[in-house]
Image (tube, rainbow, N blue to C red):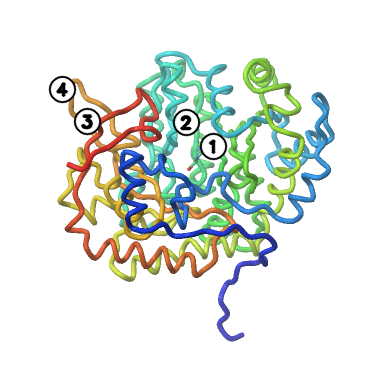
Amino acid sequence: MPHRSIIEPFRIKSVQSIDLPTVEEREKALRRAGYNLFGLHADEVIIDLLTDSGTGAMSAKQWAGMMIGDESYAGARSFYRFEKAVKEITGYTEVIPTHQGRAAERILFANSVSEGDVVPSNTHFDTTRANVEYQGAEARDLVIAEGTDPSALLPFKGNVDIAALRATIEEVGVDRIPMVMVTVTNNSGGGQPVSLANLREVRRICNEFGLPLILDACRFAENAWFIKLREEGYTDRTPREIAQEMFALADGCTMSAKKDGLANIGGFLALNDGELAAKCRNLLILTEGFPTYGGLAGYDLEAIAVGLNEVLDENYLRYRIRSTEYLAEKVYDAGVPIVRPAGGHAVYLDAKTLLPHIPPGQYPAQALAVELYRNGGVRGVEIGSVMFGRPLPDGSESPAAMELVRLAIPRRTYTQSHIDFVAEVVIDVAMDAGEIGGYRIVEQAPWLRHFTARFEPT
Ligand code: F0G
């Protein structure tokens, strides 16, 4: 067979126009937003890689599903279709819909995490960390050492450091560890996958100490595809079978259907523990909605039910993972430092290496993200010391492990020429990296400050 490109396995049925604002408009927008890209209006951005969450294109089948959405308050048909789709993939007995992933986290942690507890994970994402900390507990990241080294080439850089997990449990004591979490793929660690071998090891430790294991399953299908590509013995298994095997190793999951649910909104908490699920449902009724809709419309449940099956399609996953890798290759070949290998949903630029003249306290990744917007109207997101830096008693801050700019690729949304354009902007900015200056924070919130902080160039 001659070499053939891996193409987008769909054709476009509906479009939304995009436009590049002028240099002056971009400059003005940056000043208005306090150099925080979360403050930009979407029409001020041409290619929006802020997040892959809820930003994907739905299929015709999902839209068709929305037309049969059942909006009954209790016992909607759509809920049972949704529940069936979740049960078939995860195998968990209790399925609780939520409006998005963080609502599942909040409901779970409010009923299982107490002050002084420690929740270990490979790497907590920002909302997960914040929800753990909100309960007065500590979110502890235990990813393998290579997981925070952008240049270490490893197939499963999202793996949990098993020795560190054991040491943490022995140090803290089982009574203060309500659960172990594993994020698949490891978003804050570069969208890197976790192997089944590692999940099995984590399971073994959890069994030994009698601890529940919960997956943060937002990108479970991308993780399953990496296992198929990279883990010995899985080449001939379907993504669905691999996903089922992943879920079977855990006791439950939190899920944002805005990622691998291929939906624009939604999520769920799924568990095997009926008693815990009952408590979670009670809180759900208080803050989200009745347990058969959980804050979602019936049509959202339909979109998710269809999306959860489409996301496991091999043609889709082949295209998805390859198109992210394509952007990574283009910028890396031009000499731009990135987290390697490419993540599943995003390319992570390594601002620490690209901008060694900007200290972490002046937020090199924030500076790089601003520059990508200024140069080409491309919006990424800082995943570095703005997001994860912690204030110290002396007024300084402990920096994040890595200073990254994440270019997250919305699912089924941009074509190859859009991605070529992004690569051109990144390469252009990197050529003049020495000219980029740092930032200081002039305004910030007590938690999740990256969403609303305002900055000034130093
Ligand atoms: N866990 C992970 C690993 C995530 O990436 C996210 C969201 C959540 C939980 C929370 O889900 O947004 O539905 O409440 N990540 C998005 C991102 C926002 O841009 O990576 P949510």
Q: Is mark 2 within 8 Å of ligand 1?
A: yes
Q: Position of residue 191 (x, y in %)?
A: 45, 49
Label 4 with label 1: CB-CB less than 8 Å: no
Query: Between marks 4 and 1, how big is the CA–CA gap?
Result: 35 Å
Secondary structure of the residue carrying tag 2 is helix
Neighbor class of circle 2 (other Cα within 10 Å; few <14, some 14-19, many 20+) is many
Secondary structure of the residue carrying tag 1 is strand
Secondary structure of the residue carrying tag 3 is strand
Classify residue 86 by image quadrant.
top right
- In the rendered image, the quadrant that contains the C terminus is top left
Q: Label for residue 119?
A: none
Q: Position of residue 211 (x, y in %)?
A: 53, 25
Label 4 with label 2: CB-CB less than 8 Å: no
Q: Is mark 1 within 8 Å of ligand 1?
A: yes
Query: Between marks 1 and 2, how big is the CA–CA gap?
Result: 9 Å
What kind of residue is marked 4? Asp
429 over 268 or under it: above or below: below
Query: Between marks 1 and 3, how big is the CA–CA gap?
Result: 28 Å
Secondary structure of the residue carrying tag 4 is loop
> Which residue carries the number 4 mark?
394
Q: Nearer the viewer, residue 174 or 435?
A: 435
The residue under the point 49% across, 37% down is 182
Query: Between marks 3 and 4, how big is the CA–CA gap?
Result: 8 Å
What kind of residue is marked 2? Thr
> Which residue carries the number 1 mark?
216
Q: Mark 2 vs mark 3: which is more N-terminal?
A: 2
> Which residue carries the number 2 mark?
128
Relative to residue 200, is residue 354 drawn left or right? left
223 over 316 or under it: above or below: above
Q: Mark 1 vs mark 3: which is more N-terminal?
A: 1
Q: Position of residue 1 (x, y in %)?
A: 61, 85
